[in-house]
Image: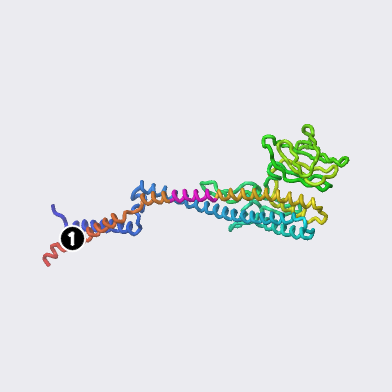
Amino acid sequence: MRIATATAYQVAIQNLQDRQVDLTETQVRLTSGKRVLRAGDDPTAAARAERAAAAIDRSTVSQRAVEASRTAMTLAESALGNAVNLVQTARETLVAAGNGSYTAAERKGLAAQLQQIRDQLLSIANQQDGAGNYLFAGQGAAGAPFVSSPSGVQFTGVGGVVSVASGEVLPATVDGQAAWMSAATGNGVFETQRVNVSGAAWIDAGRVTDPALVQDLRYDVTFSVTGGTTTYTIQPRDPNTGTAVGAPSSGTYQSGSAISIDGIAFTITGTPADGDEFRIMPSTPTLSVFDALDRAIEGLRSDSAAPTDVIQTTNDGLRNLDSVLARLQSVRSAVGDTLHRIDGVEDRLSALKLNAQTDRSNAEDLDMVQAISEFQNKQTGYDAVLKTYSMVQRMSLFQYLG
């Protein structure tokens, strides 16, 4: 079979070009480190790599959201820690105010200290994160969530929390209503109150003696002084309507002796006057940090406060501060639990992202050792073809005759 010289040249050049393209593609894969550069290289592997890339992107977005939640919760935990310290300082100040040797002016000085603490707590409650969002706005507020007014501090936000955009439900805010405005009144079961007292008597916070007997009732304790003997009458009432429930009970009053009814006990001390009235109300989650301080401040600022009034103010103030302190500590603990959960979520996201990166690498990355060996083999083959072509192209009749 006769092969023309032009055909031989064309076949050789085509072979050279094919080898050069193959060598170039191998070099491109080496420099990129990728086995699959186009979907056509390996459609199955390309699809796996695409799914893995989407999983990596989702994990990255979730990690950003988790980090935003971590930042907000860290700031909230720190703010609540500062609030707890301030309330403890206020409690110490109120304990000092109970000193019977203090003058009205000295008590006013302590009231001024409590006012400063109250203002600091308001600033903490309106604290923002780095992005200008209020930490304790709940589900949002048009402005600062806590606004001071003549009637006290009001919460203008929306209860609840805002969650970050993540596969996990993680908060970006704290429910300010629950944290600052929802402590239990009284001792958590009932609240003792002085309703109409003209004598020199005060009431303590009370205690539960038998939880099984406690009823959700209001108790009006009215004193009667006749012939030097002081007695009291306890009338149970509906806490909402004030309607009498059942028959009243009575007893002879002794200062400092506990009075018990329906599984609760309280102590009234001093000398009540005829007609003096105390009240026992069921506890409700309506006490705010600011109301607790405002009541104490108002009581300490009074110029006409009798010693028994001061005792009642300090007793009630300590009881209320203990309640709001417990509430703040509870919310702080919940935020700490959230931070712990964020650590777990972050670990899971990191594991998912690493798994997706590994899957993508397995699908499209190049085995460098194998690729280098393949490149060297192809380079050697290309060199051999070049040498062969250089020898064959001189084997023409014209060159021979020449």
- Image coordinates of residue 92 in percent, x first then y, are 69, 56
Q: Is residue 60 left or right of residue 188?
A: left
Q: Amino acid at mark 1?
A: Thr
Image point 67% across, 37% down: which residue? 211
Quarter of the picture holding the C terminus: bottom left
- The dominant secondary structure in magenta is helix
Relative to 55, does residue 130 appear above or below in the rendering? below
Residue 72 in the image: x percent, y percent?
Answer: 57, 54
Q: Nearer the viewer, residue 356 or 243?
A: 243
Q: Residue 359: image x %, image y %?
A: 39, 49
Question: Hey, which residue is sitting farthest bottom in the picture?
Answer: 402
Q: In front: 294, or 143?
A: 294
In the image, residue 152 sits, relative to residue 391, either above or below, namely above
Q: What residue do we see at 74% from left, 54% from top?
A: 98
- In this rendering, would 379 be left or right of 31? left
Question: Which residue position is annotated with label 1?
Answer: 388
Q: Secondary structure at mark 1?
A: helix
Looking at the picture, tell me which residue is in the foreground, 33 or 14: 33
Residue at far top of view: 246
Say which residue appears at 54% left-offset and 51% top-offset.
339
